[in-house]
Amino acid sequence: MARPRPALVVFLGGLGGSPVEKMVAGARAAAARDSVQAALAGGRFTGAVLVTDGSMHLPDLPAGVTVDVDPGPFHFGCRLAETVRKHDLGHVVYLGGGSLPRAQRRGITAWRALFARRRASPPGNCHAP
């Protein structure tokens, strides 16, 4: 029996508005786009959800990416659990936006294979701040 393909969940946001912070935000957004594009091109993911606080301009995203904007108070575990529930994701792989810049398809495939046997479960104790 084939294993179900996971969805890729990427969080991107949380930077300020100074010129330097805007420059870093642009680089992180571009790196996130490149990583998502490489991951989806390998056919190992059902799609991707890009979770953002809406504070930055998003580059053109590849097909298969859903943008989820949440400008409210942020709590990592709660937001991840909410994303999994909201988008009915059975299996997920999480990637911080900009944390895997310029990933090659082969690297993404190896990265996914490393976690193929693990299952993601939402945290059980989630309290909004």
Image (cartoon, helix red, strand yellow):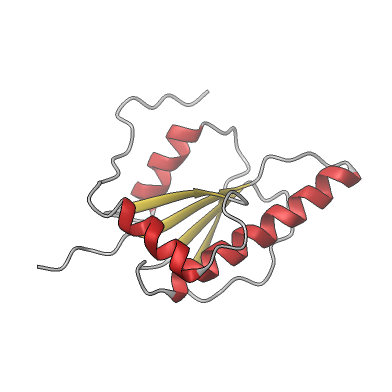
| Residue 99 in picture, x, y percent from top left | 59, 48
Residue at the extreme right:
19
Please give the count of numbered marks on the rendered protein. 0
Identify which residue, 115 or 96, lies in the foreground.
115
13 over 110 or under it: above or below: above
Q: Quadrant of the N terminus?
A: bottom left
Give me the residue at 49% from left, 50% from top: 95
Identify which residue, 34 or 18, lies in the foreground.
34
| Residue 15 in picture, x, y percent from top left | 73, 40
Residue 31 image-quadrant placement: bottom right
53 over 41 or under it: above or below: above
Whether residue 25 is visible: yes
Give me the residue at 46% from left, 75% from top: 41
Give me the residue at 40% from left, 56% from top: 111
Give me the residue at 63% from left, 51% from top: 98
Residue 27 image-quadrant placement: bottom right
Identify which residue, 58 or 39, lies in the foreground.
39
| Residue 38 in picture, x, y percent from top left | 51, 69
Q: Left or right of 93: which side holds 27?
A: right
79 over 125 or under it: above or below: below
Q: Left or right of 54: which side holds 64?
A: left
Q: Left or right of 54: which side holds 115?
A: left
Whether residue 69 is visible: no
Identify which residue, 102 or 39, lies in the foreground.
102
| Residue 114 in picture, x, y percent from top left | 32, 52
87 over 5 or under it: above or below: above
